[in-house]
Image (spheres, helix red, strand yellow):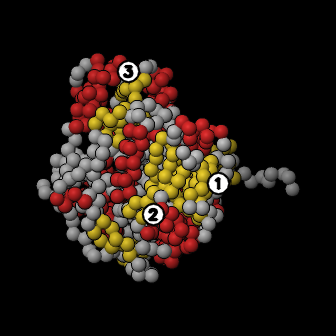
């Protein structure tokens, strides 16, 4: 199969009330591809008036949508999944053009996972039940879930379609209408999705508004006419969005990233077998998606007695990463998503070096030839240092791994937890006790045990500490998008007796 | 030695001045975490709640520069310079619509600087 940059129209509109509409003041912004820095298309630079229109459309649609049966909604979500699957190649090419990530990831991960996510939420709502509890012989408590109404969702640029699916699928499944703002670096796939699924959902149920954070994100997050705000991004904007939501006493969920430890114990090297091979790949997964993953295993903790031998093989495997044309199925890493990301990553490599970290491999930009010379490519980089260095403490969001050693379990746990964040972690061992006890001791919402970067729809995902709160994935998400209605019914004919 | 924890480049200053004209009083708050994290955010002063959990590192271009205390614990040995790059960040930072992004360049504080700053 040959993949290439897909054709884009010159410009796109916002998707409001089932139609593409131009921004009210006629302003657009240019979206360039990080693959070669060339213009892809123009998208609306929406302002408060556009956002209000989208929120109004969602509010007009919410009553009827909230009354649809689970069966009807499930059927529509299944159709959405089918449409994405039928257009898998084009979605994958669009994600690669827009975000810069390698086509092997968009074809095999981003798009199929998005499809599965819609199918998962379509399925679980059919199997759900409320509850009826007889509190005493004359009192019955019914718990019935009701949709919140209109949900504002602000999503990031690292997995544009998949993060859309993570947020939109459970919100729609629960009976809410959505106003979605994709990140301004990656507006393409949300727009493409709206084009493809337009006829499936009633008008106003799913709305997409483009634009910049301070101009379009702010009126969306602060609107008194939405019932919830869900955000994935960084901590300062997270706080700001919570403040805006607090004025309306609106619930929020926050997914704010991490600095995830990936911990390798001595026993992994007891045998040179498939499992050790898996461990080496598990350490090199820091380069997955160019390191632009909230849960990137960006801190490698290796028990000191196996360090020399293990790191040698991790460095070898890292050197074998093929960086080239993101549309080539053999390329293992693509471009960073934007120039400012690229510059930020390089500035972190610099401060790492200045702090005394030793560069084991990589350590700079990666210059590619031809059209790709203008793209944003970084060498997969491993820095050896200690956990107090800034490269160990800050989310670089690039292919930069910070490695240190530990002597025993206690020190491994101490280093793993010495961070402001607590989103992901990895634990690798052949020891049955460590398999359970170490993950329990690490303060993070997702601990992968003898695996990493697996994101099944039926496993809850979210952060401890400054990584945020609330969860994504899993059917528990439905309740993040619903109210609890309790009907308390008395079958007693006698009065209370107070009056 | 200039005894400052944070400074700013002339290019970044120019953009800050432009944004002050448009938005009035503004602050910098150093972000952390996912996506556009680890970058400084320029926000309208009245929008962002600052309290004892934040530390004031200094003023750049007449704008106070804050960071949360727990983050500062990991940053306090470094000197920061607010610079400017082209690029399309997301986040709510005010320069985003200009196609520019503030960026932090860091260097280690010298022993002399650390001694001074820790005393004052």
The image quarter in which residue A356 lies: top left
- What is the tally of numbered marks visible in this picture? 3
Q: Chain of mark 3?
A: A
- Disc 1 target residue: B50
Name the residue rendered at 44%, 31% in the picture: A386
Give a yes or no on whether discs 3 and 1 share a subunit: no
**Secondary structure state at the residue bearing disc 2:** helix
> Residue A259: where, in percent of width, then height?
44, 40
**Front residue of this view, candidates A165 and A188:** A188
- Nearer mark to the viewer, of 2 and 3: 2
Tell me if I can see residue A179 in this picture. Answer: no
**Front residue of this view, candidates B29 and A110:** B29
Of all residues, the one furthest to the right in this rendering is A499
**Front residue of this view, candidates B97 and A72:** B97
**Front residue of this view, candidates A71 and A450:** A450
> From the viewer's perspective, is A274 left or right of A49?
left
Name the residue rendered at 38%, 62% in the picture: B87
> Residue B47: where, in percent of width, then height?
61, 63
Q: Report how far apart the C-alphas of labels 2 and 3 lie in the structure.
A: 46 Å
- Along the polypeptide, which appears first: circle 2 or circle 1? 2
> Residue A444: where, in percent of width, then height?
48, 37
In the picture shown, does residue B17 fall above or below A462?
A: below
Residue B11: give its label: 2
Of all residues, the one furthest to the left in this rendering is A1
**Secondary structure state at the residue bearing disc 1:** loop
Name the residue rendered at 33%, 20% in the picture: A306
- Disc 3 target residue: A304
Name the residue rendered at 38%, 44% in the picture: A350
Q: Chain of mark 2?
A: B
Evaluate if marks 3 and 1 touch, with contact meaning CB atoms under 8 Å apart. no
């Amino acid at each position: 199969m040959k993949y290439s940059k897909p054709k884009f129209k010159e410009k796109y509109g916002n998707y409001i009330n089932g139609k593409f509409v131009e921004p009210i003041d006629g302003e657009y912004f240019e979206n360039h591809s990080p693959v070669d820095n060339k213009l892809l298309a123009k998208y609306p630079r929406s302002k408060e008036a556009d956002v209000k229109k989208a929120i109004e459309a969602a509010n007009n649609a919410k009553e009827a949508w909230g009354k649809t049966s689970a069966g009807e909604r499930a059927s529509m979500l299944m159709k959405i999944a089918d449409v994405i699957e039928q257009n898998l190649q084009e979605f994958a090419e669009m994600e690669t053009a827009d975000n810069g990530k390698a086509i092997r990831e968009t074809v095999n991960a981003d798009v199929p996972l998005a499809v599965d996510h819609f199918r998962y939420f379509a399925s679980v709502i059919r199997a759900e039940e409320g509850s009826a509890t007889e509190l005493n012989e004359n009192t019955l408590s019914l718990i019935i879930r009701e949709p919140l109404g209109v949900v504002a969702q602000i999503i990031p640029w690292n997995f544009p379609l998949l993060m859309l699916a993570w947020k939109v699928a459970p919100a729609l499944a629960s009976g809410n209408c959505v106003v979605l703002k994709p990140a301004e670096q990656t507006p393409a796939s949300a727009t493409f999705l709206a084009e493809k699924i337009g006829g499936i959902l009633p008008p106003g149920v799913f709305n997409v508004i483009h634009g910049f954070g301070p101009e379009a994100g702010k009126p969306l997050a602060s609107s008194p006419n939405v019932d919830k705000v869900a955000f994935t991004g960084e901590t300062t904007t997270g706080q700001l969005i919570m403040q805006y939501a607090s004025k309306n006493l609106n619930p929020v969920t926050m997914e704010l990233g991490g600095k995830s430890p990936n911990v390798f114990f001595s026993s992994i090297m007891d045998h040179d077998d498939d499992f050790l091979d898996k461990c080496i790949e598990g350490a090199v997964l820091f380069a997955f998606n160019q390191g632009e993953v909230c849960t990137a295993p960006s801190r490698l903790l290796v028990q000191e007695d196996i360090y020399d031998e293990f790191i040698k093989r991790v460095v070898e495997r890292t050197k074998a990463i093929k960086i080239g044309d993101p549309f080539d199925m053999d390329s293992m890493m693509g471009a960073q998503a934007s120039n400012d990301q690229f510059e930020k990553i390089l500035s972190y490599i610099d401060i790492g070096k200045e702090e005394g970290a030793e560069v084991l491999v990589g350590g700079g930009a990666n210059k590619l030839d031809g059209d790709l010379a203008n793209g944003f490519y970084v060498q997969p980089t491993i820095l050896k240092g200690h956990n107090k260095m800034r490269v160990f403490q800050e989310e670089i969001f690039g292919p930069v791994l910070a490695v240190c050693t530990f002597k025993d379990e206690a020190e491994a746990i101490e280093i793993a937890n010495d961070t402001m964040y607590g989103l992901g972690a990895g634990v690798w061992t052949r020891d049955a006790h460590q398999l359970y006890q170490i993950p329990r001791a690490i303060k993070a919402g997702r601990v992968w045990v003898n695996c990493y970067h697996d994101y099944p729809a039926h496993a809850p995902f979210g952060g401890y500490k400054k990584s945020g709160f609330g969860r994504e994935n899993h059917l528990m998400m439905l309740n993040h998008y619903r109210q609890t209605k309790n009907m308390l019914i008395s079958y007693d004919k006698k009065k209370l007796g107070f009056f | 030695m200039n005894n400052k924890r944070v400074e700013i480049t002339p290019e970044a200053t120019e953009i800050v001045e432009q944004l002050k004209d448009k938005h009035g009083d503004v602050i910098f708050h150093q972000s952390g975490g996912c996506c556009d994290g680890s970058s400084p955010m320029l926000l309208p002063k009245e929008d962002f709640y600052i309290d004892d959990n934040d530390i004031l590192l200094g003023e750049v271009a007449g704008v106070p520069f804050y960071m949360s205390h727990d983050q500062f614990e990991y940053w306090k040995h470094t000197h920061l310079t607010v610079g400017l790059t082209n690029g399309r960040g997301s986040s709510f930072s005010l320069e985003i619509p200009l196609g520019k992004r503030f960026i932090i360049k860091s260097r280690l504080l010298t022993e002399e600087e650390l001694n001074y700053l820790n005393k004052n």
